[in-house]
Amino acid sequence: MAHFLPTIPTGTQASAAIARRVHRLCAAALLLALPAVPTLAFAQAERYELDPVHTRVVFEISHAGYSQAIGTVSGSTGTLVFDPEDWDSARVEVSVPLLRLDLGDAKWNRAALGRKLLDGDGHPVATFVSTRIEPIDDTHARVFGTLTLRGVAREVVLEVAFNQLKRYPLPPFRRTAGFSATTTISRQAFGIREWPTVIGDSVVLRIEAEAQRVRGDDEVDAGDPAPDAADAPAPAIPPEAGDAAPETPPQPTTPEPTP
């Protein structure tokens, strides 16, 4: 029966054999792991679109030293590529429709959008395109990018807070990311120099943004919990036998807006 037993190397021969086996195992493990590296790095980065209804730019600027005039711009659109576990891979592009500027007064709005200030006719849209991200912690980062305003491009830095990412509680239950950001720019740096004794130079910007994950019509967000039962409509109660059917209340002609 001896000829059925494997040959067992001894001494130097055994050490060399063991080393060769370890080398082969390590090489095989490395080859198996390499194809998975890019997949793991980008598996969670997903594309989102800004929700123009729930995205707003707020600006503050000195009114002759008496107060801080406050205005807003609604309706911003854009795209976001984002992975909450990997801020470095995030990218954002935003278009801000300046013609939707609102300072709370029609004359102020026309003046701000006039040719000597924002020039809304010649440059109706401001854009921001990110160039790099500096993570601070799990929920904060500095987003560097190019702001183009009135035809002039300058680098700005947004101090961004990541608020949350989860499925929105109302239909169509899209995964939604929420952010708050602030920065301060110089209007003169963008060629807006008129009325320096009335309008301050520093403009404080505050951005509140929501972005919904882009998905197919039949796609379901994996891992998301079902909506709370409390959010679901109450089931209809059938009438007792012999009771008249309840009168159907009039239905609204238009759906209520999503909050």
Image (cartoon, rainbow, N blue to C red):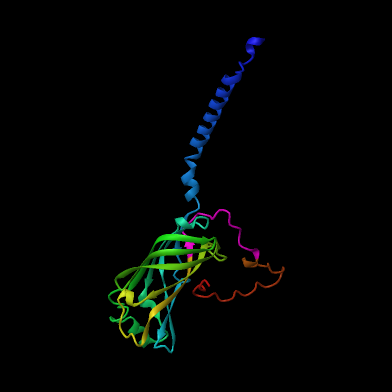
Magenta residue check for 196: no
For residue 95, above or below residue 114: above
Where residue 60 appears, as percent x and y from the top left, is 43, 80
Q: Is residue 142 left or right of residue 149?
A: right
**Which residue lies at the image location 28% right of the left edge and 81% below the top edge?**
116
Magenta residue check for 227: yes
Q: Quadrant of the N terminus?
A: top right
Query: Total label count?
Result: 0
**Which residue lies at the image location 54% right of the left edge and 60% below the top edge?**
138
For residue 105, above or below residue 202: below
Q: Is residue 135 left or right of residue 149?
A: right
What is the chief secondary structure element of the magenta stretch? loop
Residue 41 visible in rendering: yes
Residue at the extreme right = 241
For residue 14, above or below residue 96: above
Depth check, front residue: 255 or 177? 177
Depth check, front residue: 186 or 49? 186
For residue 177, above or below residue 116: above
Magenta stretch: give its range: 211-229
Residue 215 visible in rendering: no
Where residue 242 appears, as percent x and y from the top left, is 71, 70
Residue at the extreme front = 12
Q: Is residue 249 left or right of residue 42?
A: right
Residue at the extreme bottom = 66
Where residue 99 appears, as percent x and y from the top left, is 35, 77
Depth check, front residue: 6 or 115? 6
**Which residue lies at the image location 50% right of the left edge and 36% below the top edge?**
30
Where residue 92 appears, as percent x and y from the top left, is 42, 62
**Which residue lies at the image location 41% right of the left edge and 84% below the top edge?**
62
